[in-house]
Amino acid sequence: MAIGNRLECLRGHPSGHARREPAAYERVAVSSSSAPRPSYRSVFAVAEFRALWLSYVLSAGGDRLALVAMTLLVYARSKSPLLAAITFASGFVPYLFGGFFFSGLADRLPRRTVMVGCDVARALLVGVMLLPHLNLGALIALLYLVTLIQPPFDAARSAIVRDIMEADRYPLAAAVLQSTTRVVTVGGAAAGGLVVALFGARPALAADALTFVASALLILLGTHARAAAADASGGENPLAQIVGGARLVFGDPALRTLMCLGWLSAFSEIPEGLAAPYVGKLGGGAVAAGLLIAFSQLGSAVTTPIFTKKIGPLTRLKWMGPMAVLSCAALIAAIARPGLALSMALFALSNVFTMYQIAANTAFVERIPNERRAQAFGFANAGIVVGQGVAFAIAGAAAEVVPPSTVVALSGGLGALIACGLALRWRRMSPAVGRHTARHLGREASLTRQTLVRAARSN
C-alpha cells in the first residue's frame, strides 16, 4: 500500500488550481443515500487515470524485473550472498533519502514534468547499466540511483490522482492502485525470474528501460499540463518546504496517526519476507514459496476493490481501527505451525483486513493542502518502504534463532498491540463516527490548513 495520494482540483482544469472547499470529506461522507455510488467503470472512464494506471503498471513491473535481474546477475558473477543482499536492498534503502529530500519536487514543479523527468532519467540510468564490462560496484551504484529517483515519481503520481479524480471517485481509484501494486509485486517478481531464466539478466534490464520510456510517453500524452502546486506558497526555499512538510505531517496528531496506520504494513507483510524459510520448514521449495507470497497478496488484491465499492466512507472510517488490529492479530495463529494450505489461507485472511488502508489513505489525503501534498506523501511512502525493509531484515535475523512461524506470530502480536493504540487514539480524535463525523473531519482539516498558513507566514 502506499497511503499517500491526492487533493482537490477541478477535473481537466489546465492550471490544476481550483477553489478547495473547507470540508472536502464532508461532501463525500454526507452525500445523499439516494445518489448513485460511483463505479469502477466511471473511474476508468477518466482518460488521465487510464494513462496513469497503465504507466504505473509498466514502470512498477519494470522495477521488479530490474531488481530481480540485478540480484541474480550480481549473485551469478560474485557468488556472494552479501552482495546479492546489498543489491536487493536497493529497493528499500535509497527510498529513505529520496522520499524525504526529493518528494517535494512534485510540489515545487509541475507534477507531470516531474514524472516524465524521472522516467527519462531512470531509462538513461538503466541504459548505462547495459554497457558491457561494467564492474559490480558500478552496477549496484546505478541501481541505487534508479531507486533514489523513484520517490519523487511516486509522490507526483500519488498527488496528481487526487487532482484528476473527483472526491467521491478517489477512494475507488486508490483501491485500484493498491490492488494493482499487490498484483504487480507478485507478477513482476515471477516474471523477472522467468525472463532472467529464459533470456538472461541484460535483456531483462533492457525491457526495464523500455518500460520507463513507455511510461513517460503515456504520462506526457495522456495527462493534462498543470501548474506547480506550490506556486502560491510565497517563494519558499526547498529546505523550508521540507521542514514545513515535516512539521505538518508529524506535528498534526491526526495525520501522524493515519500515517502510522499505513506503516503497520511492515508487520502484516512479514510472511512475504520469510516465505522461503517458512515453507522450507514445511518441506516445500520455490513453488511453495511463490504460492505463499501470492496468497499473502491475494486477499487484499481481491477484496479491497469490493470493500471500497460496497462500503460507504463513514463505515470505512468506523472499521478502520478494528481492521488494522485484525490485519496483524490474524498472524498470531501461525504460532500453531499450520501446514502450507492453512498458512496460505491465514496469510490471505490477514491481508484481507489491510483494506483499512483505503480509509486511512482517504482521510490522510483530505487533510493535506495541495501545496504540501507530494512532500507529505513522500514522508509516508518512505516510511512504508523503509519500514518493510527493516522489518524483513529483523525478521530474517530472528528466523535464524527461532522457527519462522514463531517470528510471524510474534510480529503479528506486536503489530496488533501497536494497532490497538493507534485505533484508540484515532477514536478519541474523531469519536462521533456517525452523521457528525464528516463535519468533524472537515473542521479538523480546516484547522490543519489554518495552522499551515500561519506557520508559512511566520517563516
Image (cartoon, rainbow, N blue to C red):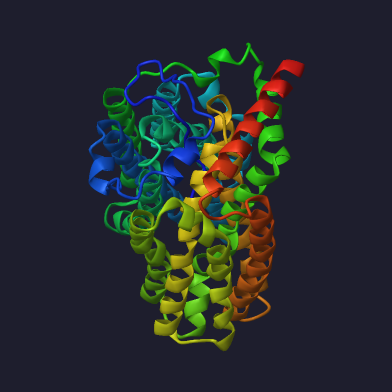
**Residue depicted at x 47% and y 79%:** 279
Say above or below: 306 vs 238. below
**Quadrant position of residue 442:** top right
Marks counted in the figure total 0
Taking the view exactly as shown, the residue that stands out farthest to the right is 458
- Would you say residue 3 is visible in this rendering? no
- Residue 217: x and y in percent read 29, 27
Taking the view exactly as shown, the residue that stands out farthest to the top is 235
- Would you say residue 85 is visible in this rendering? yes
Report whether 53 appears left or right of 346.
left
**Quadrant position of residue 345:** bottom left
**Residue depicted at x 32% and y 42%:** 58
**Residue depicted at x 51% and y 77%:** 278
Q: Depth check: 119 or 299 in front?
A: 299
- Residue 151: x and y in percent read 52, 36
**Residue depicted at x 65% and y 73%:** 413
Say above or below: 432 vs 362. below
Q: Depth check: 362 or 219 in front?
A: 362
- Residue 53: x and y in percent read 32, 40
Q: Depth check: 440 or 309 in front?
A: 440
Q: Quadrant of the C terminus?
A: top right
Report whether 123 appears left or right of 360.
left
Say above or below: 89 vs 11. below
**Quadrant position of residue 287:** bottom left
Report whether 383 appears left or right of 64.
right
- Residue 100: x and y in percent read 63, 35
